[in-house]
């Protein structure tokens, strides 16, 4: 993916705050915090554009192996900034929702796995953000909803990743009623991977990160890209695509080192050239 400019390209190597987002790089992890609790971490246009630019910079720099998105305050994100949408014209409205789609698709196309760490309310585009992340961990007090129907603005873009995560009937229940689901239900339905105690979110996310970063980031990137390429194909087309991906993967230096290490009963030494 192309870079997003000099300023944004530096974010993977430094700590900074931009448009109510805090970026912190620590070892293998780039942590992005929605840091505007007074506005319930609303996803306004500039915030979404900033988040997208930084995700692209992280992908381009390849300095991080995993991205974690968390939030300050009682809301992970209450969704779009409704003040920004009030009185909006069509051109500006399209700019907002184009930016939203750009953000959510960027999460899928960057090489790093993206984990949502949710402690609180995730509604509308905030729920969409959780559903779009590759993995999600939530505290037991977290709730999830698509309440747009209640204000006459149906959650049409959130519908895309949510319906793919939880299935048609469950997604329609959320979308048509606007009623929230609790964290246990979100886990049962597949919207989040696991639920932790309210004080256990950091430890659970750290353990998940450790389980991912022990493996080759090169291989993880291949797998993530292939997953989203095959998931909506027919079974035959998916096999046709993935057999080519796996054939190419099998002969690269990383896989060959991993295979030899397994046969030799030793820890693999991943080639540095492939990990960049």
Image (cartoon, grey):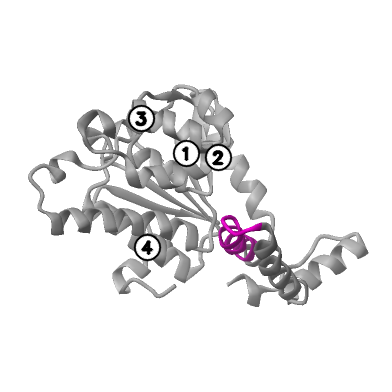
Q: Nearer the viewer, residue 224 or 56?
A: 224
**134 is higher (above) or lower (below) than 118:** below
| Occupied quadrant, residue 86 | top left
Residue stretch rendered in magenta on the structure: 220-234
Mark 1 or mark 3: whose residue is earlier in sequence: 1
Q: Does the CB distance between marks 1 and 2 fall below 8 Å?
A: yes
Q: Which residue is mark 4?
A: 11
Q: Which mark is residue 176?
A: 3
Mark 4 or mark 3: whose residue is earlier in sequence: 4
Q: Label 2 crowding class (10 Å Cα cut-off): few <14, some 14-19, many 20+?
A: many
Q: Position of residue 139 (x, y in %)?
A: 49, 27
Mark 1 or mark 4: whose residue is earlier in sequence: 4
Q: Which residue is mark 2?
A: 205
Mark 2 or mark 3: whose residue is earlier in sequence: 3
Q: Residue at x 22, y 48 (%)?
A: 44
Mark 4 or mark 2: whose residue is earlier in sequence: 4
Mark 2: secondary structure: helix
């Amino acid at each position: 993916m192309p870079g997003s400019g000099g300023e944004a390209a530096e974010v993977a190597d430094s700590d900074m705050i931009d448009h109510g987002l805090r970026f912190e790089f620590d070892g293998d992890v780039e942590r992005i915090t929605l840091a505007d609790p007074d506005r319930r971490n609303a996803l306004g246009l500039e915030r979404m554009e900033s988040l997208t630019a930084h995700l692209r910079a992280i992908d381009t720099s390849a300095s991080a192996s995993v991205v974690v998105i968390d939030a300050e305050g009682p809301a992970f994100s209450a969704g779009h900034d409704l003040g920004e949408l009030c009185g909006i014209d069509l051109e500006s409205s399209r700019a907002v929702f184009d930016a939203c789609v750009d953000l959510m698709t960027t999460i899928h196309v960057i090489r790093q796995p993206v984990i949502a760490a949710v402690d609180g309310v995730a509604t509308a585009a905030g729920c969409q953000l959780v559903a779009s992340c590759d993995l999600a961990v939530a505290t037991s007090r977290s709730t999830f909803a698509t309440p747009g129907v209640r204000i006459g603005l149906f959650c049409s873009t959130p519908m895309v990743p949510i319906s793919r995560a939880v299935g048609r009937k469950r997604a329609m229940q959320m979308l048509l009623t606007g009623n929230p689901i609790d964290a246990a239900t979100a886990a049962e339905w597949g919207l989040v991977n696991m639920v932790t105690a309210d004080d256990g979110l950091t430890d659970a996310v750290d353990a998940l990160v450790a389980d991912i970063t022990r493996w080759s980031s090169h291989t993880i990137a291949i797998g993530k890209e292939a997953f989203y390429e095959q998931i909506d194909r027919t079974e035959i087309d998916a096999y046709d695509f993935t057999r080519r991906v796996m054939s190419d993967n099998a002969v690269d230096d990383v896989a060959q080192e991993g295979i030899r290490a397994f046969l030799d009963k030793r820890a693999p030494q991943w080639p540095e050239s492939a990990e960049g």
